[in-house]
Image (tube, grey):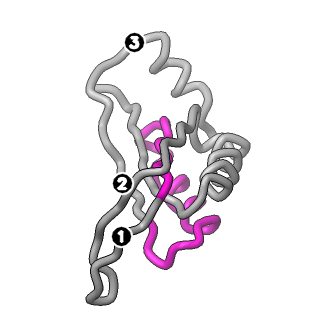
Amino acid sequence: MSQAIVVQTTTDSSANAEKLAETIVQNAQGACVQIVGPIKSVYKWQETIQKEEEFLVSIKTTRPFFSSLAELIRQHHKYEVPEIIALPIIDGSSEYLEWVANQVHN
């Protein structure tokens, strides 16, 4: 199994998503960040159903950097409780996964 993971979060605007993406790459916490949107999110917050337009931010990184990446997201995110989830990459191009591993560092 690869050490590579995809970490996902959402933001309220394209500008905030791009700013977060640049911060992540500049700090070497993610090799590549993709932004998709707008998307429609439906969720319950403070006992009320919310329907919001958001932008999905997908970050390719490695498992050892999840904690530091999650902290970086929290520091630069506008949401009180941002989505920060990690999805395993169970297989992939060995050259790409090696590139991801070489891009993230402290």
Residue 2 drawn at (x, y percent): 33, 26
Front position in the image: 58 or 60: 58
Q: Label 3's element?
A: loop
Q: Label 1's element?
A: strand
The image quadrant where one finds the C terminus is top right
Which residue shows up at 66% across the image and 40% down it?
A: 25
Instruction: Give the residue type that dot 2 points to.
Output: Ile
Q: Is residue 44 above or below residue 85?
A: below
**C-alpha gap between disc 3 and disc 1:** 37 Å
Q: Earlier in the sequence, mark 3 or mark 2?
A: 2
Q: Which residue is mark 2?
A: 85
Instruction: Give the residue type that dot 1 points to.
Output: Lys
Q: Which residue is mark 1?
A: 51
- Residue lying at the far bottom of the rendered structure: 47
**C-alpha gap between disc 3 and disc 2:** 23 Å
Residue 51 drawn at (x, y percent): 36, 70
Q: Earlier in the sequence, mark 2 or mark 1?
A: 1
Marks 1 and 2: in contact by CB < 8 Å?
no
Within 10 Å of disc 1 (Cα), the crowding (few <14, some 14-19, many 20+) is few
Residue 11 drawn at (x, y percent): 52, 60
Q: Is 10 covered by the magenta stretch? A: no
Which residue shows up at 48% across the image and 50% down it?
A: 38
Which residue shows up at 63% across the image and 46% down it?
A: 21
Q: Is residue 82 above or below residue 86?
A: below
Residue 21 in the figure: left or right of residue 38: right
Q: Which mark is residue 93?
A: 3
User: Which region is colored magenta?
Assistant: 54-82
In front of the other: label 2 or label 1?
A: 1
Which residue shows up at 68% across the image and 55% down it?
A: 15
Q: Is residue 3 above or below residue 49?
A: above
Instruction: Give the residue type that dot 3 points to.
Output: Ser
